[in-house]
Each structure stands twice: as structure tokens, then as C-alpha cells.
Image: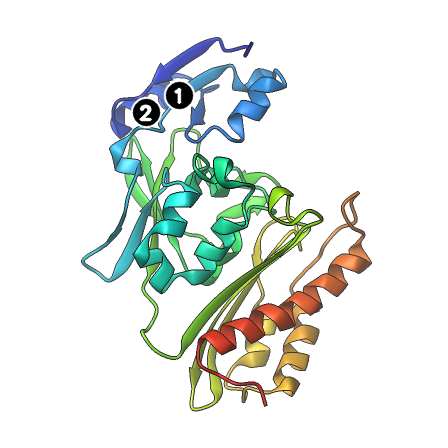
Amino acid sequence: MFDIATYHRATTLTDALSMLSANPEAKLLAGGTDVLIQLHHHNARYRHIVDIHELPQLHGIALTEDGRLRIGSATTFSEIIDNPLTRKHFPALCAAAASIAGPQIRNVATYGGNICNGATSADSATPTLIYNAVLEVHSPAGVRFASMNGFHTGPGVVSLQHDEIVAAFLLPLPPEKNVGGAHYKYAMREAMDISTIGCAAFCQLKNGYVEELRLAFGVAAPTPVRCPHAELAAYHAPVSAQMLDAISEAVLQDVNPRSSWRANKAFRLHLIQTMTRKVVSEAIAAAGGELQ
């Protein structure tokens, strides 16, 4: 039996924000795949629950008037995988979603929960970074917008106050042509395991040259990170094996993995360089490029 002291089901987003403000110990419940584990282990910090999983303001995937895709924070990973808009415009996000656990978990686990939990191993974090997502954050004071780049501030910590709720993710639509994205996850048991290293890449090509590269890694630092040195190494470079060599060397300046029971630091660094080559190559191929 779960040790729950109070449970409230919010009927509106305003209602949920009021409940959070009234109880500094309250925890949000959406998909529940993380929260229920904490309750199972009788974590005392999860005794006061505010249930938001049925709020319509937090669901849905739709285009906005300013040319972005708005994905509600309570949208499940199965919904992301199945949606034609995400499949067309954000394939790396769909690939990351498909790598999460098994279908039963993907049917209930939410995009917002995966990001706001703050784990560097969150599979959706790297594609959210490379697609330059902006978070729509609601509080009793109003609405603010926060870049995904910098939203994670430490291990298990995000830039979110107690009385704030991420309502949606806003992803700018990429150009229609000469762009590609890819995601890759290395785990000991593939989909059913936590990531040992995860990465995602987005590239835009022009006349056989890299117009832009965005590269992000998870479990390569205390937080999910973009890789500015690796990205700069690709800027306006011709698509070639030499370019991949330069990127895989430069990425070492952007990461700082640790040793753990899953993998030691040296192995993670090897994975990072190998996965950089793989994910960038796949993004280039998806953009219509061909390595020389």
C-alpha cells in the first residue's frame, strides 16, 4: 500500500497551481512512472500528491500560428511516436521516444515528466536540446518561456520553482529540405534499460557543406548537454570522413562522464566518440548528404 497523506485531482491548470502553492510538499502526478516508484519505496517526500494527468491544457500535439509544434507536457511517448507531425518534422524525438522502456510504459509515461524529473539519462532530453525547444511554464504569476538549453541545472535538478508547471514544449519547425535528425541510445539491455550513453544530432546541409550541426549527449555530464566545440568543428565543413574525425575529437571538450556500475569513464568516452560518428552520419544521410 502506498503511504499517501493527501491526494488531490486537479480539474484545471489553475487549480493545480493553487494546490502546489498551498502545499510546499506537494508532488505532481502525471504518467506516474517515476512517482509510483518513489511511493512504492515509501519515499516520505512523495506523501502529498496533486494529480494532473487528465488536464486537457497539458495534452495534444498541434501547430501554432508562429510556425512551431506545441506538444503538451502530459502527452505520452506513444502519442509522440504515432503522431504524423512529430514523425515528419522531429524524427529524432520519435526515435528517442521509441527507445524508452517498453510499450506499456510508453503508453503512460509523459514527455514533461521525463524532462522535469531532471535525470541526465532522460532519453527525450537530447532530441529536445537539438531541436531548440522552448518550455511553456505556468505559475500563479503568469506564463514564462524557458530554453531547454540550460533548463537542467544539476543532477536531478531543473530550473523550475515549486509552484510552476511545464505545460508544453514549443519546437520550431525545421526547414523542409536538406535537414536531418537522428538519435542513438546505448544501453546494456537496449530499450528496457536506462541509457549508458544517449545522443541526438540535427544537421542542415548546403551544397555538400554543413550549414549547421547540433549535437547533444545524455549521461555524458551531470546534466544533458549540447556540444558547442563539436558543433563548431562541423561549421561550414565539407561532408567528409575528415569532418567526422574532427567532430569526434572536439566532442571530448564538451563532455565529462563519470564512472558508475554501468560503465567506467574510459568506456563512456569511447562510446561518446563512436556514437558521435554514428549519429552525425545518420543525420547527414537523412539530410540527403553523402560522406566522401
Q: Earlier in the sequence, mark 2 or mark 1?
A: 2
Residue 40 visible, this angle: yes
* Relative to 54, 269 lies left or right: right
Binning the other alpha carbons within 10 Å of mark 2 as few (below 14), some (14 to 19) or many (20 upward) gives many
Q: Label 1's element? A: strand
**Percent of width and height locating residue 236:** 50, 86
Q: Which residue is found at the position 27% from the left and 23% from the top? A: 15
Picture residue at 44% right of the left edge, 18% below the top: 49
Please state, as top left, top right, bottom left or bottom right, where the N terminus lies in the image: top right
Q: Are marks 2 and 1 in contact (CB under 8 Å)?
A: yes
- How packed is label 1: few (under 14 Cα within 10 Å), some, or many (20 or more)? many
Residue 130 pos. (x, y %): 47, 62
Q: Amino acid at mark 2?
A: Ala
Which residue is farthest left?
A: 65
Residue 16, label in figure: 2
Q: Please give the residue where the numbered disc 1 appears in the rendered image.
A: 50
Measured as percent of width and height from the top left, residue 10 is found at: 31, 21
Can the viewer see residue 253? no
The residue under the point 31% across, 57% down is: 84
Return the x and y of residue 270 as percentages of the image width and height. Answer: 76, 64
Gap between marks 2 and 1 measured at Cα = 7 Å
Q: Residue 13 lies in what quarter of the image? A: top left
Q: Is residue 121 left or right of residue 160?
A: right
